[in-house]
Image (cartoon, coloured by chain):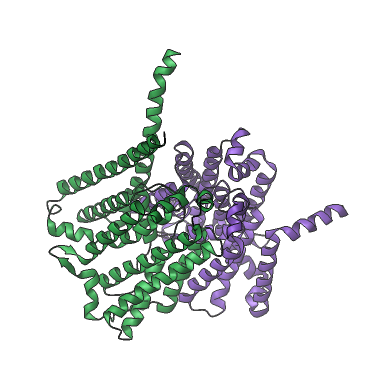
């Protein structure tokens, strides 16, 4: 019976990912039909810049949401880390130290979130709404209306460099991170425990899982990933404004939910998140090729989010109704 | 009579609202001692006028949070409803302003109903639904306006001045907020449906045994929140005399913060109108005091962020959850 239940769950997850894959194929085909330039290695390589930074944050965010927590302060952390790097650059720091500063700032901000949620026991959505204005506010306060752009020439390597051929450093980093997080979630004890915490925190605690330690580390990981994303984005733009990455938190969360992670916790795969990231990136890029403004795009993304989450629910209901029909006819 | 008084005092001592009221009063006193603007009745009325829209939106949000939902789409709803009536006013200046107020409210109500039906009928998580509709509503504002601004010279004077009429020293906008506070407090306290909202949020499965469908209550809460947001769309556009795509961008988070500071629990089932009113006034005071205190506009966001974080830590500990998961609280 247990094996059967697992088999059922596996089938359901597989169906979600295959649905996403279909959407991805449709999006790619649609793009290719609409623009002759889309199916080109260089174009596709350019398109990847549209999602790698956000997707990098989406990976630990997926773990957080699977564990029934959420972090809406990620975009503000990106801004804070970028400001920290900007001042380091103004002080003439070398490139490796700058990158380290960005990542460390992110980790520190994540630790603050973790502290609020675990030690002070504030619900994560409330805590991170607070720190979101705090972090973004500090970035605004320090920077005002100025722009920092004293980055050394070598700093561009993170966001503008290519590892080999058309594979950018950003894309390579994202693929490696996705593999690492995927293995962590799907093939280690820690991963199983993250699912357990999300499925039932009390039961997890009673079975000896150090729930709060996991939560704290997940927030720190999300902060570190936001710091990394900040290094990539700042390096790509070669400048820092306090408005950097404005609104990213919603795009990142949309990515995770579209990827099949349940906000009720305990459900979701990294493959789904990666597929969702690619879908959103290609849609954004494709509509950009058609000169459609970003705000109209948000309609599409919002609708996609609702439809993709609603479809399986409607489908299950429809199947249940069909399964019921012969029974009621026989009765 | 005296026993009633005694009872009241005892309840006050144990209530979170009383603590927040004291804090808000102390803040006001401190500000009044320092800045003359906070001693002047007229400017205090202005401060209330400035907070009225936040109050209206936070009341709607409170209903949603009490039923275990969250409405991230309120600010986008404000922008869309506001833009719709501003454009209508521009195209048909003859339409009377009260009709447009009604239309904005109705449009907001329909948008809220969309959220509510998706949550109730499809059983989708509220945060997912409103994350999606937030993006859709915001995009719709752009489609509707073509990205253009509707400035004050394109709106009729009657349309813009309706809420600025004053009675007894308060603007019509302020009276509207007070009316909403009073009506909602009575409804939540005495009406059967009002009580059912709390039951549905406090314990959905127990509510189901009493014949209360939690999803239906959520749908109702979203609809009311949407209607208030639609009304605020009109109010926002006329108060700031401009409608554009980014109106009220990010305001949903301030609205939620006001609720949380006011003691509404995100675990559902807990929250009072008085608390939300105080939460809004607290935020309003801070927002109005910072420029007077000579804090640079760039630092104001950080200071209010810090205030929100601290207030949230003090007021939003997992109170309701602690009772539910006794073990977890022990381990912590």
Residue B284, percent from left and from top: 58, 66
| Residue shown at 49% from the left, 49% from the top | B230
Supply the letter of whichever chain is green: A
The answer, for residue B119, to whether it is visible in the render is: yes
Depth order, front residue of A308/B139:
A308
Above or below A253: residue B198: above
The colour with which the image depicts chain B is: purple
Q: Residue at x 43, y 67 (%)?
A: A110
Image position, residue A6 (x, y; %)? 38, 39
Q: Which residue is drawn at 52% across and 79% down?
A: B295
Q: Which residue is drawn at 38% across and 29% down?
A: A318
Q: Where is residue B227 in the image (x, y as percent from the top left)?
A: 52, 46
Quick check: A99 left or right of B183? left
B312 relative to A42 in the view: left or right: right
Residue B204 found in image quarter: top right
| Rendered view: A331 above or below A149 | above
Q: Is residue B59 placed above or below A235 in the rendered structure? A: above
What is the tally of numbered marks visible in this picture? 0
The C terminus of chain B: image quadrant: bottom right
The extreme bottom residue here reads A91
Please indicate, yes or no, whether residue B157 appears anywhere in the rendered image.
no
């Amino acid at each position: 019976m247990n094996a059967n239940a697992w088999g059922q769950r596996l089938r359901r997850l597989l169906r979600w990912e295959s649905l996403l894959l279909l959407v991805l194929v449709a999006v790619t085909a649609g793009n290719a039909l609409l623009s002759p330039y889309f199916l080109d290695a260089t174009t596709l390589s350019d398109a990847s810049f549209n999602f790698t930074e956000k997707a990098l944050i989406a990976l630990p965010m997926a773990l957080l949401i699977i564990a029934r927590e959420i972090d809406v302060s990620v975009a503000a952390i990106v801004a804070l880390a970028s400001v920290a790097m900007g001042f380091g650059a103004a002080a003439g720091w070398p490139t490796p130290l700058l990158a380290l500063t960005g990542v460390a700032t992110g980790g520190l901000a994540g630790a603050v979130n973790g502290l609020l949620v675990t030690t002070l026991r504030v619900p994560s959505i409330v805590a991170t709404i607070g720190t979101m204005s705090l972090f973004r506010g500090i970035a605004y306060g320090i920077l005002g209306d100025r722009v920092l752009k004293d980055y050394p020439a070598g700093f561009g390597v993170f966001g503008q460099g290519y590892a080999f051929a058309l594979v950018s450093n950003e894309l390579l980093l994202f693929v490696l991170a996705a593999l690492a997080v995927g293995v962590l979630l799907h093939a280690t004890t820690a991963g199983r425990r993250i699912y357990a915490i999300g499925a039932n925190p009390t039961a997890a605690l009673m079975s000896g899982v150090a729930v709060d330690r996991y939560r704290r580390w997940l927030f720190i990981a999300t902060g570190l990933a936001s710091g990394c994303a900040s290094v990539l984005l700042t390096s790509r733009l070669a400048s820092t404004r306090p408005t950097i990455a404005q609104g990213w938190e919603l795009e990142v969360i949309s990515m995770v939910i579209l990827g099949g992670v349940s906000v009720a916790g305990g459900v979701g795969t990294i493959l789904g998140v990666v597929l969702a990231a690619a879908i959103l990136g290609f849609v954004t890029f494709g509509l950009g090729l058609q000169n459609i403004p970003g705000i109209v795009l948000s309609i599409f993304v919002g609708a996609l989010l609702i439809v993709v989450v609603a479809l399986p629910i409607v489908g299950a209901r429809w199947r249940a109704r069909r399964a019921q029909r012969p029974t009621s006819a026989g009765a | 009579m005296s026993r009633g008084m005694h009872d009241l005092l005892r309840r006050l001592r144990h209530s979170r609202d009383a603590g927040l009221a004291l804090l808000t009063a102390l803040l006001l006193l401190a500000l009044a001692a320092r800045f003359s603007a906070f001693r002047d009745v007229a400017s205090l009325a202005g401060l209330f006028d400035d907070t009225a829209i936040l109050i209206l939106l936070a009341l709607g949000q409170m209903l949603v949070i009490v039923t275990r939902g969250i409405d991230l789409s309120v600010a986008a709803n404000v922008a869309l409803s506001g833009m719709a009536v501003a454009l209508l006013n521009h195209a048909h200046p003859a339409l009377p302003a009260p009709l447009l107020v009604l239309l904005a409210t109705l449009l907001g109500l329909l948008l809220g109903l969309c959220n509510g039906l998706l949550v109730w009928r499809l059983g989708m998580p509220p945060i997912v639904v409103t994350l999606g509709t937030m993006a859709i509503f915001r995009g719709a504002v752009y489609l509707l306006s073509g990205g253009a601004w509707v400035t004050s010279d394109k709106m009729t004077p009657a349309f813009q001045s309706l809420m600025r009429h004053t009675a007894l020293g308060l603007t019509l906008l302020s009276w509207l907020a007070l009316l909403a506070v009073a009506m909602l407090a009575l409804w939540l306290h005495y009406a059967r449906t009002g009580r059912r909202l709390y039951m549905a949020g406090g314990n959905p499965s127990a509510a189901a045994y009493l014949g209360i469908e939690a999803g239906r209550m959520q749908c109702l809460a979203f609809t009311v929140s949407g209607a208030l947001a639609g009304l605020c769309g009109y109010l926002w556009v006329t108060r700031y005399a401009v409608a554009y795509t980014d109106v009220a961008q990010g305001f949903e988070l301030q609205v939620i913060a006001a609720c949380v500071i006011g003691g509404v629990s995100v675990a559902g089932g807990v929250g009072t109108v008085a608390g939300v009113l105080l939460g809004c006034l607290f935020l309003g005071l801070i927002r109005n005091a910072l420029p007077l205190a000579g804090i640079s506009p760039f630092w104001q966001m950080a200071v209010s962020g810090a205030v929100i974080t601290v207030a949230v830590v003090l007021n939003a500990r997992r109170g309701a959850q602690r009772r539910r998961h006794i073990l977890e609280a022990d381990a912590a």
